[in-house]
Image: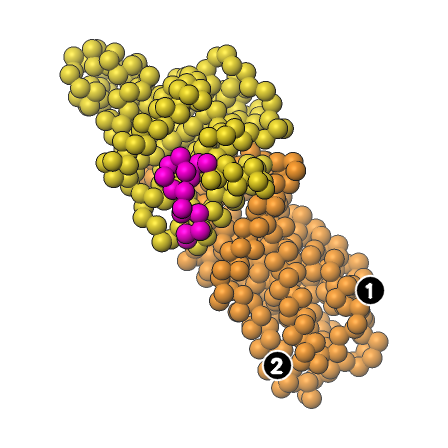
Chain colours: A yellow, B orange
Amino acid sequence: MQDTRPVSQPAITRSGAALDVRGLSKSYGRIKALDDVSFAAERGSVTALLGLNGAGKTTLFQILTGLFVADRGTVQVLGEDFAARPTAALASMGLVFQQQVLDLDLTVMHNLAFYAGLHGLRGSVARDAIASCLGQLGLGDLGPRQVRELSGGTRRKIEIARALLTTPEILLLDEPSSGLDTGSRRALVADLFTLARERDIAVLWATHLVQEIEEASKVIVLHRGRIVAEGSPSDLMARSGSLTLEAAFLSVARTGQEGAAA
Amino acid sequence: MTPWFSALSAIIWREFLRFRFQTSRLVSAIVRPTLWLVVFSAGFQNILGVSITPPYETYVTYDVYMLPGLIGMVLLFQGMQSSLALVFDREAGMLRLLLTAPVPRWFVLLAKLLASALLGVTQAYVFLLIAFLFQVDIPPLAPATLLPALFLSSFTLAALGLLLTVYVRRMENFAGTMNFVIFPAFFFSTALYPAWKVQESGATWIVWLIRINPFAYVVELLRFSTYGTLNPLALAVTIVAGAVAFLLAAWGYDPQRGMLGRKARDEG
């Protein structure tokens, strides 16, 4: 895919974690959605955020995208404080939300062109980027189709194509494979892992499907707003004495429920 | 093209695109005031007329008097419809896409208001053409003299609608609220009758409502602008109402306040 970063964006700093989260906490009334969460996502790798429903994954994403503000803690994006320069941080991110976010009444092309425009891409640059991203995901002939006519899985792939439009340096994916069939899910996983390596992108992948992040560089297990385990998949399996990552995850989640860390 | 201007263009473009695809909205935006013009003015113009009072320099028929109020109705409905669309965007998740764009949040809201204002101006001119075809006596320069007032009025009414979306989060609630706002705003204004006529009738409480109703000042701004003159009080109130509504709405959409409607039970 071509590099579509607008000329006005600052030069990339290539040292340090792409995403550095420290001491993040967020409460909704008496409910602690996030409790002292700290982690880093490195360039060129996939960091998986694993957690059951209600673990706090989406709340974390809301804060990382500026939709909500944390009660405490900091987020650094490419070395800069998110709170100090939110627009610069958002310019470097591609986002796939858990909830589908597409205008059903417009065509695929219109949806992507709108996103491109929001992010400073216009004219032939936008058109070329859209064609490239759609082609990469096997959606090349869907441009003129109204989104309402398409299946849920196809819509999801369009959202992923959209997130890649601006050649982001950080990809935040909240359950990106939801709605995809097994074959499409496998292909998506392979594509995204390859993309992270080849383009030096930091990918933060939130999911409850263990099998799709088995190749991740790092797995962070979130339980009731707290990080209860962190490490490579093999580390987690070794520490929990499990033969599979799924077993390790469930073991850690149970341990988390009992209040003692692995 | 700077990123800000690109985002502004994209937001305006999308609003016009969606309006084009929503045929019923387009039709009702024009049919509604046209019905009022035809039914009320045809029925009342031989009964009601307005004696000489600024900006009119002669006795005018009721259709001439009603025209600014009906233009205001077009703008008011457009402002509320745009806000309803924003509530829909919030429920459908599209608002997240807007609020995570790499431009300041207040700019996104401002762009939405500008888009709504432009849509309102467009619809107003279509209605003005229809009024002309129905032989309403319109000053020849009115299309030109009205433009600034149309834009400012449309912006203000859209800003008031935007402010409503801060507090009314569900589409079904907002649709009901729209009616609760639109019709009192329209009827308790000078759209259908001059305030001095109401004063004469002794309904002082209606006069007070007219005086505190921003829409009444929008109507008067449009009325005077039609004749190339300025009503300073109407202009000032319209500007202040729009600015205050926008600032309050921008504050209401502050992420610290969590205005995206997420509750703890939605946590994932």
* Disc 2: which residue: B38
Q: Is residue A254 visible?
A: no
Identify the chain of the residue marked 2, using the numbered disc in the image.
B
Who comes first in sequence, dot 1 or dot 2?
2
Give above or below for A211 relative to B227: above
Q: Secondary structure at mark 1?
A: loop
Q: Secondary structure at mark 2?
A: helix
Residue A143 highlighted magenta (yes or no): yes
Q: Quadrant of residue B52?
A: bottom right
* Disc 1: which residue: B229
Residue B77 percent location from the top left of the image: 57, 63
Identify the chain of the residue marked 1, using the numbered disc in the image.
B
- The amino acid beneath tag 2 is Val
Q: Please tell me which residue is depicted at 53% across the width and 55% down the height of the picture.
A: B17
- Relative to residue A226, is residue A250 drawn left or right? left
Q: Is residue B247 visible?
A: yes
Residue A103 percent location from the top left of the image: 44, 49
Residue A98 percent location from the top left of the image: 36, 37
Which quadrant of the figure contains the C terminus of chain B?
top left
Which quadrant of the figure contains the N terminus of chain B?
top right
Q: Please tell me which residue is depicted at 74% across the width and 57% down the height of the picture.
A: B148
- The amino acid beneath tag 1 is Thr
User: Observer-nearest residue: B81 or A217?
Assistant: A217
User: Observer-nearest residue: A154 or A118?
Assistant: A154
Residue B235 percent location from the top left of the image: 75, 57
Q: Please tell me which residue is depicted at 74% across the width and 66% down the height of the picture.
A: B143
Give above or below for A29 relative to A41: below
- Looking at the rendering, the stretch of residues picked out in magenta corresponds to A132-146
